[in-house]
Amino acid sequence: MNSYLSAIGFSKIKSLHQLDLLHRDVMKNPDHRTVTGYSLSHSYVQLDKAYGSGIGLSLVGEMDSSGSFLAEHAFPYIAPGPYAFTDDVILEERVSVTGFSGVLDNVNLSVIFYVQNIAYVNGLIWNNRVPNKMRVSLNGLSIGGSILIPLNKTEQEREYDLDKRREEMKAIRDFRNGNDSIYDLLLLKDMDRKDTVDRRLQTEDVLSIVDTSLIPYGTECDIFDLIGTIVAVNETENSRTREQIYILDIECLYYIIRIAINKEKLIGEPVRGRRFRGITWLQGTVLAE
């Protein structure tokens, strides 16, 4: 059972029977349906149903030529925010279930996310139209988090840090495009950053130093211990359970990630400018340009 259902307001689902009733609801009343080629006799189908503004459940499976649908698996999702960017994306097929992982290779960290629009990507593969560069939106579901006070930085210092991250992202893209000389520069910057943090940790707490990080958590490659700055806060309600959900836009590393978290699972008051820290299942959508 997907533990991240609580992030979109289904924290009371504890049995397979309850989960089956939810899946049947999606099958009977989907808000969006995507059907793509899978073979000459079968199609891949993805059914999406919203259970609140920007949150919902997606059911994926196979349909044969007679129209019979067999569900394979389901996952909770959060709809992407207005922060899409174009980048090189590696798509890898998942082993446990039909689906894909997206990989953004940033030299010092590979950001791996669960691809939400599975049927769409399957259609690209079926038609042999998968580009290297794609339009990406990063989203996430968090099962527990806390609000941290912002670091004591001036506006000029924050702008300087943002400019440095933008320069580093440009350097990463130049390296991907064949400029090998940039690799040494990126490596030196990473070493300098590590030395600075190690030195400050002798007298300071780590959360008084780090304003943004994305650290792999546990054994799943797309789950991270995320720290970032809140740039927008919204609330929604699960239309079925009436549980309250925070929708947070988080500036993390080079990205702005839209995250859903159950209000009961968040410690502290989310306010623009404060930091968020939480265990987050990173998701995303990809679109061919």
Image (spheres, rainbow, N blue to C red):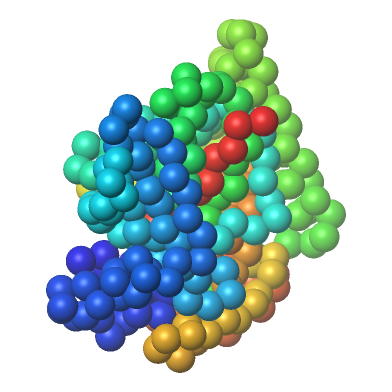
278 is higher (above) or lower (below) than 187: below
Residue 278 lies, in percent from the top left, at 43, 66
Left or right side of 253 for 283:
left
150 is higher (above) or lower (below) than 108: below
Residue that extends furthest to the front in the rendered view of this protein: 66
Q: Residue at x 72, y 37 (%)?
A: 166
Left or right side of 57 for 42:
left
Which quadrant holds the C terminus?
Answer: top right
Residue 164 lies, in percent from the top left, at 72, 38
Residue that extends furthest to the right in the rendered view of this protein: 156
Q: Quadrant of residue 179?
A: top right
Can the viewer see residue 224 in this picture?
A: no
Q: Nearer the viewer, residue 221 or 107?
A: 221
Q: Nearer the viewer, residue 197 or 20?
A: 20
Q: Residue at x 28, y 46 (%)?
A: 66
Residue 154 lies, in percent from the top left, at 80, 62
